[in-house]
Image (tube, helix red, strand yellow):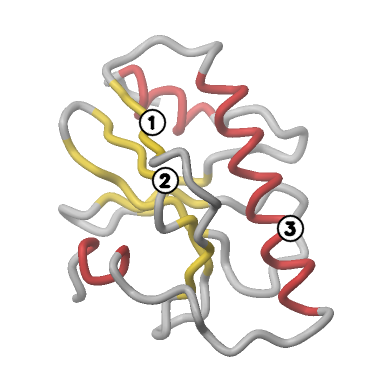
Amino acid sequence: MRKFIDMITESSSYMREIPRDLFNEGDLLTNMGKLVINLERVSGDFQLDWDRGPFVVAQDQGDGSTYVANMSLTVRGTKVLLLRPINSREKWPLLLIEEEDWNEIEVFDRSGNFTPEMVAYLEGSDA
């Protein structure tokens, strides 16, 4: 398995196709915006970091998922990865991936609210 740092340092210059990647990247940024809004409503030991520069959308060359390379979420001292599966048809497809065991957590339900698993993860409790 690749380390998160390898994924984060990859170039965002993957080969884009129009209109597919306009929709994929736009949806990723919409999901990240919703994440920021929802984080304001949850308590827990987490921190969202962003370098205040332009959003750098990168692609995992293994599975095609996209992520914002210059934005990171740290939960209880551990950096997690936030990915949007490539060509997802879901409205809120964002996934949180834990580095330690590569556990996947669906971030949003169909309404754009955090899933119970996401809330439990952020708050450090069981779902």
Q: Residue furthest right?
A: 19
Q: Name the kind of residue labelled 3 in the image.
A: Gly
For residue 111, which quarter of the picture? top right
Q: Are marks 2 and 1 in contact (CB under 8 Å)?
A: yes
Where is residue 77? Give x, y as percent: 16, 31
Q: Name the kind of residue labelled 1 in the image.
A: Leu
Disc 2 to disc 1, C-alpha distance: 7 Å
Where is residue 113? Give x, y as percent: 66, 28
Residue labelled with disc 2: 71
Where is residue 59? Give x, y as percent: 48, 74
Label 1: element kind: strand
For the point 27% across and 31% down, which residue is it?
A: 75
**Quadrant for the C terminus in the image:** top left
For residue 41, side relative to residue 70 (left or right): right
**Front position in the image: 96 or 8:** 8
Residue labelled with disc 1: 48
